[in-house]
């Protein structure tokens, strides 16, 4: 049984995870942390420092401003933490790296098991296809309320691909400003915004007379919650270090 502290328990993802864990015989939320009220089957505190229950891992889907107190609690109580919150500053990312020397932390650009499997596939195929002359394009689609473009996941996919290419490729976000042929060492990244699309990411390898496409479609945010719970189970009992979702899928 994995005992979980759910930070941000009354937010949308916190409630999704609460529902998933309630139906999971191998996990239990023993306490929540949130400044807002909600209906929960476990005690909820306004600050994680107030939590009295013993736990095996923290899942954080709260707000970047709460990072310091979550990391402090994790170190003081030696409770690993799955960091699902986005929007960290570089200073905060550096602190996460430093704190991981003292306690197990897991952070990933996307908690979906499918997306992280896709990233592992990119590691396996990129170099072969690039050396064979295939051009690389990434197209991501999201709902019309999403503020940033391209998505963090699209950039993470590009970084995984570029990592296999010694970081030699540039990212191209807009082709309307220049009239020129496509350079070989380039990864095109396009963003589509519309309707209620939860999330779609497609990596296209376009060669001469053949095209290979890898695509992941999210139909609900529940996939991110499932990934977070899987990550919590994985992180339980782990030694200090910085982990990611690709460690979870093996």
Image: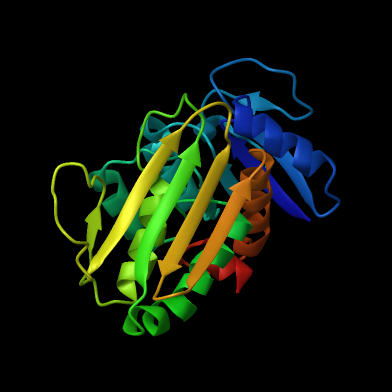
Q: Nearer the viewer, residue 64 or 113?
A: 113
Q: Nearer the viewer, residue 43 or 64?
A: 64
Q: Is residue 57 in view? A: no
Left-right relation of 80 to 225: left
**Quick one: quadrant of the C terminus?**
bottom right
**Which percent across, then down, holds residue 120?**
51, 71
Check the image and report above or below for 111 versus 149.
below
The mark total stands at 0
Quadrant in the picture for residue 37: top right
Residue drawn at (81%, 55%) of the image? 26
**Quick one: quadrant of the N terminus?**
bottom right
**Which percent across, then down, holds residue 127?**
37, 81
Residue drawn at (24%, 47%) of the image? 90
**Which percent across, then down, holds residue 50?**
55, 30
Q: Is residue 206 in view? A: yes
**Which percent across, then down, holds residue 35?**
53, 19
Left-right relation of 90 to 102: left
Residue drawn at (54%, 63%) of the image? 214
Left-right relation of 152 to 34: left
**Which residue sits furthest front?**
209
Q: Nearer the viewer, residue 152 or 206?
A: 206
Quadrant in the picture for residue 51: top right
Residue drawn at (64%, 63%) of the image? 234
Check the image and report above or below for 19 versus 163.
above
Check the image and report above or below for 167 versus 13.
below
Q: Which colour scheme appears in the figure?
A: rainbow
């Amino acid at each position: 049984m994995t005992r979980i502290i759910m930070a941000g328990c009354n937010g949308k993802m916190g409630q999704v995870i609460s529902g998933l864990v309630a139906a999971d015989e191998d996990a239990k939320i023993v306490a929540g942390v949130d400044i807002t009220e909600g209906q929960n089957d476990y005690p909820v505190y306004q600050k994680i420092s107030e939590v009295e229950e013993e736990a095996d891992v923290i899942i954080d889907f709260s707000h970047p401003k709460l990072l310091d107190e979550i990391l402090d609690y994790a170190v003081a109580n030696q409770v690993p933490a799955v960091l699902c919150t986005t929007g960290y500053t570089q200073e905060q990312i550096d602190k996460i790296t430093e704190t991981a020397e003292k306690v197990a932390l897991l952070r990933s650009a996307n908690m979906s098991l499918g997306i992280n499997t896709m990233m592992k596939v990119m590691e396996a195929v990129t170099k072969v296809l690039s050396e064979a002359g295939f051009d690389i394009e990434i197209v991501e689609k999201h709902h019309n309320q999403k503020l940033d473009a391209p998505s963090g996941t699209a950039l993470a996919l590009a970084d995984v691909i570029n990592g296999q290419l010694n970081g030699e490729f540039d990212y191209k976000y807009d082709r309307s400003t220049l009239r020129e042929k496509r350079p070989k060492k380039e990864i095109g990244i396009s963003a589509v915004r519309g309707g209620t699309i939860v999330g779609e990411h497609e990596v296209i390898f376009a060669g001469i007379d053949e095209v290979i496409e890898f695509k992941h479609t999210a139909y609900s945010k529940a996939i991110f919650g499932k990934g977070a719970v899987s990550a919590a189970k994985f992180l339980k009992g782990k030694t200090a270090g910085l982990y990611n979702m690709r460690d979870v899928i093996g």
